[in-house]
Image: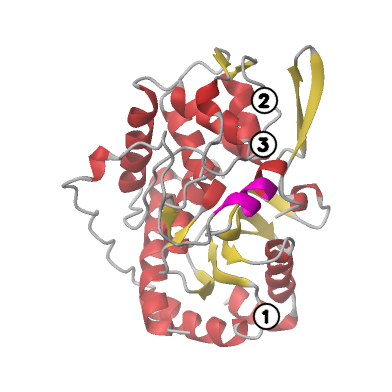
Amino acid sequence: MKHTSTSRIVLRSAAWLLGGMLAAGLAGVAGATPTGGERAAAKKTSVSKKAATSRKAAKPSQLRGRQAPRAVQPSRFEGEYRARAIKVGAIGDNLGLKSNVALVIDQTTGELVFSKNVDDVHPIASITKLMTALVILDAQLPLAERVDITAEDIDTERGSRSRLKIGAEFSRDDLLHLALMSSENRAAHALGRSYPGGMPAFVDAMNAKALALGMGRTRFVDPTGLSSANVSTASDLVKLVHETHRQPLIRQYSTSPNHQVTIAGRPARFNNTNRLVSSETWDIGLSKTGFINEAGRCLVMQAKIQGRPLVIVLLDSWGKLSRIGDANRIKKWLTSSVGSGPLSG
């Protein structure tokens, strides 16, 4: 592990989190068996790492000529963070994580708990939908407004399936719920398509929000995450998880075990893509899973472990249950005698 590089990146995220918490007054204080869409994505996607945007993906014009925000200056706790990064990294090497990228941050203090390849830029698949939800809520669009599912919402890039039939009509609230909870791609696409100004304006808003949050190595091209050109780093995603966790509706919808809507006059039940939200041994405040072949299995969560609020980011994990296994391995380590040393400081 490159402790110095890793610590520097995470220290900036930690300082940002701590400053944000103090300024906000501590305000507002996901994987499972893949969906049909995820299975189809695994079959049809290219293993190439080159980004191939869909015909509906918009070019984020606001990124042109824009400079990344200035790095946050390290806090007075930098020496402590750096020492912890070395100590925790040495222990964490023995965890046997299947995720190629992993980051755990104390949400209250910004303290680094665990890190692995946090500066690597990766496709993030449906983790993208957290930003989709954030942009929708920031725009204060009426959630009761009805939105049609159209042919434009069909996934022509990967051929993922959906139970949301063409011509069906749903409230924006239901679409938001399904996008966050069951990672419904047509729901997410319809949210972006129905945004004022259409899809190009929506993608621009996503990238503008990322810049505003200091996510300097993040780029979005669509609201679903189906394109491998939606990329970020673990340290950037900590900021996204922290910001979305401040939204009560995103917390509620991303962690609800299931949700029922009416399709063609019949009830249809959708389940959460993260089985951990139904586990009695986990206290999860926010969750989102993601998968395309280029991204591997991804999972981000806000969770309390032994009463301590943590942000957990796991990217590029291979194997259907590997991200779940990694989350449980991290939890076991933190609650064991080995993990309790660095955790409690």
What span is colored magenta in the figure? 39-45
Residue named by callout 3: 161
Residue 270's place in the image compared with 71, above or below, is above
- Residue 125, position as x, y percentages in the image: 53, 50
> In the rendered view, does 14 fall on the left or right side of 260?
left
42 is within the stretch colored magenta: yes
Q: Residue 272: name its quadrant.
A: top right
- Which disc, if any, is residue 294? none
Instruction: Determine the secondary structure under disc 3.
Output: loop
Q: Can residue 289 be seen in this view?
A: no
- Secondary structure predominantly adopted by residues drawn in magenta: helix
Q: How crowded is mark 3: few (under 14 residues within 10 Å), some or many (20 or more)?
A: some
Task: Identify the amino acid type marked 2.
Answer: Leu
Residue named by callout 2: 164
In the depicted view, which residue is nearer to us: 329 or 37?
37
Residue named by callout 1: 96
Residue 7's place in the image compared with 136, above or below, is below
Instruction: Determine the secondary structure under disc 2.
Output: loop
Task: Identify the amino acid type marked 1.
Answer: Gly
Task: Identify the amino acid type marked 3.
Answer: Arg
170 is within the stretch colored magenta: no
- Residue 90, position as x, y percentages in the image: 56, 88
Q: Which residue is drawn at 54% across and 59% down?
A: 295
Disc 2 to disc 3, C-alpha distance: 9 Å
Q: Which mark is first along the chain, 3 or 1?
A: 1
Q: Which mark is first along the chain, 2 or 1?
A: 1
